[in-house]
Image: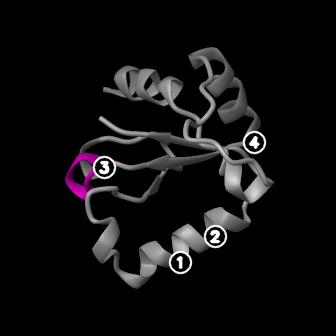
Amino acid sequence: MRRSLLAAVALVLAALPAARGQETDEAPRITQQEFKRLLAAGNVVVVDTRNPEAYAEAHIPGAILLPLEGQLTWPESYQKTVDMLKRSRKPIVTYCA
């Protein structure tokens, strides 16, 4: 399961382009090797966008749960997470199923 999670992460890198003054419809992508390097260096925030059940089953250690399916009805704790991510200066890697 961990290998498939790493493969999923390699597909999407969301570096909060709007927070950096960049407007884009597509997030930059990174390789699995680049993700591993960032993760090992502790220089990345990892966000798991799957549902809470999938997160509980398995997730990348240290990943923050922020499920996309409930984004219109997020509890306050998720909104606080979004606010924290907006202030982050580290690259943000998102992954899903």
Cα distance in 3D space between marks 3 and 1? 19 Å
Dot 2 crowding, Cα within 10 Å, few <14, some 14–19, many 20+:
few
Residue 88 image-quadrant placement: bottom right
Cα distance in 3D space between marks 3 and 2? 20 Å
Residue 19: horizontal and vertical position, in percent? 73, 58
Q: In the rendered image, which residue does mark 4 sit on? A: 43
| Amino acid under disc 3 | Tyr
Instruction: Pick whichever, 86 or 22, lies toward us.
Output: 22
Residue 94: horizontal and vertical position, in percent? 50, 42
**Do labels 4 and 3 touch, CB within 8 Å?**
no
Q: Secondary structure at mark 3?
A: helix
Residue range corresponding to the magenta coloring: 50-54
Q: In the rendered image, which residue does mark 3 sit on? A: 55
- Closest to the camera, between mark 3 and mark 1, is 1
**Do labels 3 and 2 touch, CB within 8 Å?**
no
Q: Secondary structure at mark 4?
A: loop
Cα distance in 3D space between marks 1 and 4? 21 Å
Residue at 26%, 57% in the rendered image: 69
- Closest to the camera, between mark 1 and mark 4, is 1
Q: Is residue 95 magenta?
A: no
| Amino acid under disc 1 | Lys
**Do labels 3 and 1 touch, CB within 8 Å?**
no
Q: Taken as a whole, is the magenta stretch helix, strand or loop?
A: helix
- Closest to the camera, between mark 4 and mark 2, is 2
**Disc on the earlier residue, 4 or 3:** 4
Q: In the rendered image, which residue does mark 1 sit on? A: 80
Q: Secondary structure at mark 2?
A: helix
Number of marks present in the image shown: 4
Residue 21 image-quadrant placement: bottom right
**Disc on the earlier residue, 1 or 4:** 4
